[in-house]
Image (spheres, coloured by chain):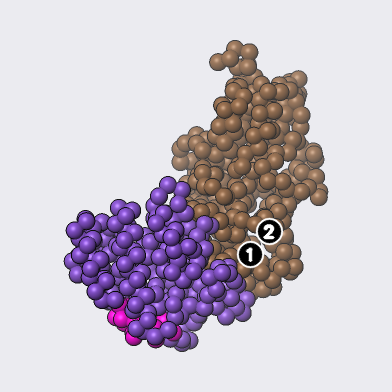
Chain colours: A brown, B purple
C-alpha cells in the first residue's frame, strides 16, 4: 500500500479507463465504444480519433444506447457502453435488466461520473442509487474501483470476462492505493491495512478516506482493518465474515445512498453469517443539498475525522452489544 | 417454397398455437393469429438460417419485439427444427423453458430477451450496425406490434437507424389496430405510420400482412435506407369470432369456442 497521506497526487480514473480501452482497441478490432453524446465526458476523444467508425454515438438516447449495445454484442463485437452513470442506469434500467442482464449479453456498461461527482449540478445528476438498481440484477457484476490502478485492472478484466459487467467510475481525483501491476479479481476484497479493533470497508472514492481514518485511529492506539471492496456483486462473503469474526465490528462508507448499496450488501452477509455491530455511512436517503462531491462527503459524515469518530462509537458497542 | 405451401404451414402453426393456448389456459392468441403469416414467411422462405447451428455467425437475425406472442414464435421455431415439436406441450408449465416471453439463454433461435415493449428495435439496430462494422452479410428483421410503437425507445432507434444508414435492417409493424384493451385509434393513435417513418428517413412498404403474395416480396425488398413494412393485419386472423375483437388480446377460448376455431382452421387446410 502507498502512503496516501504523504503522496497526495490525485488521478481521474477516466484516464485509466480510456488508456486501457485504447490499448484493447488496438489489439482487438471487435472492441467498440458506444455513447450517448458523451464523447467528452467519457473521454472518448482519443478512441474516436483513432477509430472513428468504431465509436457508435447514438446521440442523447440512453434506452437506445443500451439496446444497441446488446445488438452489437449479438453481432460479435465487444461493446463498452459509456454514459454518465445517473442516465446510463436510471434512464435505461429496464434495458439493462432485459437486454443485458437477462439476455446475458457480453456488454460492458461504464457508468461515468458516478456518485456525487457532479456535485453542484444537483440530485438529478447524482448517481447515488446505481448500486441498488444494478446489484439486484442476476448475471451482472457490479464494480467500483478505488483508484486508477484498480480501474485499469478492472477494465482489462472486464474485456476478458464473457458476460455483462457494470463498472462504476468517478471523475473525482483519487490517489493511487493499490500496487502497480495489481490484477483485478471479481468478488475479492483487498486488505489495505490489518487490525483487530474494527474493519472499515469501502470502495470507489471512499477507500482512501477510510485509510486516512484508519491512520487517525492508529494515532489513538486503535488498529483498524481496512478492506477495499470494489465488487458490490458478488460480495466477498468470506472477507466480510472473517472481518466480523476477527474484528467484531464493521463500518462501511460509500458514495451512494445508505439504502441498498455496498453497506447493505455487506449487512446481508453479516446478518446471515456472523452478526456483529455495524454502521453504514453514505447519503442518508435524502436528495443532497448543493455542494461539491468532496463537500457533500464531508457533510454526510464521511470526512476521515468523522469516519474515525463513527468507528470509535461502533467499537464501544462491541462490548455493550447495543 | 410457394405461397400456397406457406399458407398451409401458417394454418398448421395457427392450429398448434390455438391448441396450446387452450391447453395452457393462457396466451396472447389475438396478436399471435395476426403475426403468424409474417413469422411463417420469415422462417420458411426468407431467413437464411441453420436450425442445427442457431448461433451461426452468418445467420440472419430475427427479433420478436412483441414478445408476448412467444407461443406463436415457439411453434414456428419448433416447426422449423430449432426445438422439438412435442416440447410445445410444456408451454407455461413449471420449469419449462417456454415461458410467456422468449428467453435467448434457453431457447435456440431466440436472439434477445423481449417482453417489455420497445426493446427489440434498438437491439436490432445494434445487430445491423454490427454487420456494417464487421462486413457481415446477414440481414436483421424485427417484428413489433403497432401499439408498441407508442414506446419512445422505438423512435430513438428509428432515428439512429436512418443516421447509421442501415439498409440491412427491416422493421415489420404488425398493424392489427388493437392494443390490450382498446383500439390504437382510441388510445394513442400513431396511424398513419408511413408518413412518420418516411419523415425519419426510412423506406416504407404497406402490405396486407395476412397475404403471402404481399408479405414475401416486401420482406425481400432491398434499398439504400432502412426499410419498414407496415403490415395491415387482423387481430385473431383465421378464426371468425376472434377477428378484430379487442376481447381476444389474451382471452382463452372455452371448450365450445375451441371446437369452432379448430373446425374453421381445419376447413381451410
Q: Which residue is mark 2?
A: A159
Q: Is residue A136 left or right of residue A305?
A: left
Q: Earlier in the sequence, mark 1 or mark 2?
A: 1
What residue appears at the point 68 percent right and 23 percent down from the top-left corner?
A245
- Chain of the residue on which disc 1 is drawn: A
Instruction: Quadrant for residue A82, please give it.
Output: bottom right
Q: Is residue A94 visible?
A: no
Q: Is residue A172 left or right of residue A283?
A: right
Q: Looking at the figure, which quarter contains the N terminus of chain A? A: top right
Q: Looking at the figure, which quarter contains the C terminus of chain A? A: top right
What residue appears at the point 27 percent right and 64 percent down from the top-left corner?
B30
- Chain of the residue on which disc 2 is drawn: A
In front: A104, or B2? B2
Q: Which residue is mark 1?
A: A78
SS for callout 2: helix
Residue A118 image position (x, y, % from top left): 55, 50
Cα–Cα gap, marks 1 and 2: 8 Å
Q: Please, which residue is most extreme toward the top here?
A: A320
What residue appears at the point 66 percent right and 67 percent down from the top-left corner?
A31
Whether residue A289 is situated above or below residue B25 in the rendered picture: above
Residue B174 image position (x, y, % from top left): 33, 72
Whether residue B184 is situated above or below residue A238 in the rendered picture: below
Q: Are marks 1 and 2 in contact (CB under 8 Å)?
A: yes
Q: Is residue A171 visible?
A: yes
In magenta, the rendered stretch is B203-220
> Is residue B218 part of the magenta span, yes or no?
yes
Circle 1: is it few (<14), some (14-19), or many (20+) Cα within 10 Å?
A: many
Residue A155 image position (x, y, % from top left): 69, 55
Whether residue B61 is situated above or below residue A317 in the rendered picture: below
Instruction: Quadrant for residue B38, please give it.
Output: bottom left
Amino acid at each position: 500500500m502507498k502512503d496516501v497521506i504523504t503522496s497526495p497526487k490525485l488521478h481521474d480514473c477516466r484516464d485509466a479507463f480510456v488508456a486501457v480501452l485504447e490499448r484493447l482497441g488496438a489489439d482487438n478490432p471487435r472492441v467498440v465504444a458506444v455513447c450517448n453524446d458523451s464523447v467528452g465526458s467519457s473521454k472518448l476523444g482519443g478512441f474516436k480519433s483513432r477509430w472513428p467508425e468504431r465509436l457508435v454515438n447514438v446521440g442523447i438516447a440512453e434506452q437506445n444506447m443500451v439496446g444497441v449495445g446488446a445488438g452489437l454484442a449479438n453481432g460479435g463485437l465487444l461493446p463498452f457502453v459509456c454514459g454518465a452513470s445517473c442516465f446510463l442506469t436510471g434512464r435505461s434500467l429496464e434495458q439493462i435488466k432485459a437486454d443485458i442482464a437477462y439476455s446475458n449479453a457480453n456488454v460492458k456498461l461504464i457508468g461515468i461520473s458516478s456518485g456525487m461527482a457532479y456535485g453542484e449540478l444537483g440530485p438529478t445528476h447524482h448517481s447515488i442509487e446505481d448500486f441498488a438498481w444494478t446489484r439486484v440484477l442476476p448475471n451482472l457484476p457490479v464494480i467500483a474501483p478505488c483508484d486508477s490502478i484498480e480501474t485499469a485492472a478492472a477494465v482489462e478484466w472486464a474485456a476478458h470476462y464473457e458476460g455483462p459487467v457494470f463498472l462504476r467510475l468517478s471523475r473525482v481525483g483519487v490517489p493511487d492505493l493499490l500496487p502497480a501491476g495489481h490484477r483485478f479479481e471479481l468478488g475479492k476484497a483487498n486488505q489495505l491495512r490489518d487490525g483487530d479493533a474494527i474493519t472499515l470497508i469501502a470502495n470507489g472514492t471512499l477507500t482512501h478516506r477510510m485509510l486516512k481514518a484508519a491512520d487517525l485511529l492508529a494515532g489513538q492506539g486503535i488498529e483498524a482493518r481496512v478492506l477495499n471492496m470494489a465488487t458490490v456483486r458478488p460480495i466477498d462473503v468470506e472477507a466480510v465474515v472473517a472481518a466480523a469474526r476477527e474484528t467484531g465490528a464493521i463500518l462501511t462508507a460509500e458514495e451512494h445512498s445508505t439504502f441498498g448499496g455496498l453497506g447493505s450488501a455487506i449487512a446481508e452477509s453479516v446478518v446471515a453469517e456472523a452478526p456483529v455491530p455495524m454502521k453504514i455511512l453514505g447519503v442518508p436517503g435524502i436528495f443532497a443539498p448543493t455542494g461539491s462531491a468532496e463537500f457533500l462527503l464531508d457533510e454526510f459524515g464521511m470526512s476521515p475525522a468523522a469516519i474515525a469518530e463513527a468507528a470509535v462509537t461502533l467499537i464501544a458497542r462491541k462490548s455493550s452489544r447495543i | 417454397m410457394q405461397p400456397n405451401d406457406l399458407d398451409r404451414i401458417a394454418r398448421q402453426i395457427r392450429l398448434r398455437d390455438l391448441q396450446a393456448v387452450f391447453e395452457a389456459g393462457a396466451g396472447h392468441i389475438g396478436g399471435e393469429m395476426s403475426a403468424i403469416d409474417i413469422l411463417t414467411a420469415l422462417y420458411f422462405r426468407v431467413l437464411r438460417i441453420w436450425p442445427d447451428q442457431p448461433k451461426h455467425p452468418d445467420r440472419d437475425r430475427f427479433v420478436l419485439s412483441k414478445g408476448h406472442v412467444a407461443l406463436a414464435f415457439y411453434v414456428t421455431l419448433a416447426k422449423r427444427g430449432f426445438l422439438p415439436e412435442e416440447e410445445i406441450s410444456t408451454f407455461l408449465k413449471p420449469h419449462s423453458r417456454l415461458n410467456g416471453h422468449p428467453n435467448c439463454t434457453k431457447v435456440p433461435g431466440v436472439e434477445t430477451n423481449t417482453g417489455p415493449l420497445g426493446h427489440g428495435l434498438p437491439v436490432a439496430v445494434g445487430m445491423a450496425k454490427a454487420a456494417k462494422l464487421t462486413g457481415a452479410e446477414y440481414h436483421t428483421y424485427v417484428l413489433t406490434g403497432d401499439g408498441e410503437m407508442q414506446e419512445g425507445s422505438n423512435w430513438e432507434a428509428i432515428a439512429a437507424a436512418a443516421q447509421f444508414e442501415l439498409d440491412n435492417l427491416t422493421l415489420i409493424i404488425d398493424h392489427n389496430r388493437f392494443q390490450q384493451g382498446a383500439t390504437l385509434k382510441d388510445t394513442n393513435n400513431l396511424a398513419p405510420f408511413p408518413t412518420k417513418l418516411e419523415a425519419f428517413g426510412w423506406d416504407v412498404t404497406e402490405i396486407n400482412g395476412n397475404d403471402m403474395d404481399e408479405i414475401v416480396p416486401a420482406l425481400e425488398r432491398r434499398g439504400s435506407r432502412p426499410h419498414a413494412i407496415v403490415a395491415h393485419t387482423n387481430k385473431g386472423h383465421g378464426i371468425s369470432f376472434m377477428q378484430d375483437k379487442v376481447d381476444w388480446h389474451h382471452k382463452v377460448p372455452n371448450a365450445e369456442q375451441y371446437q369452432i376455431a379448430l373446425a374453421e382452421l381445419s376447413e381451410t387446410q
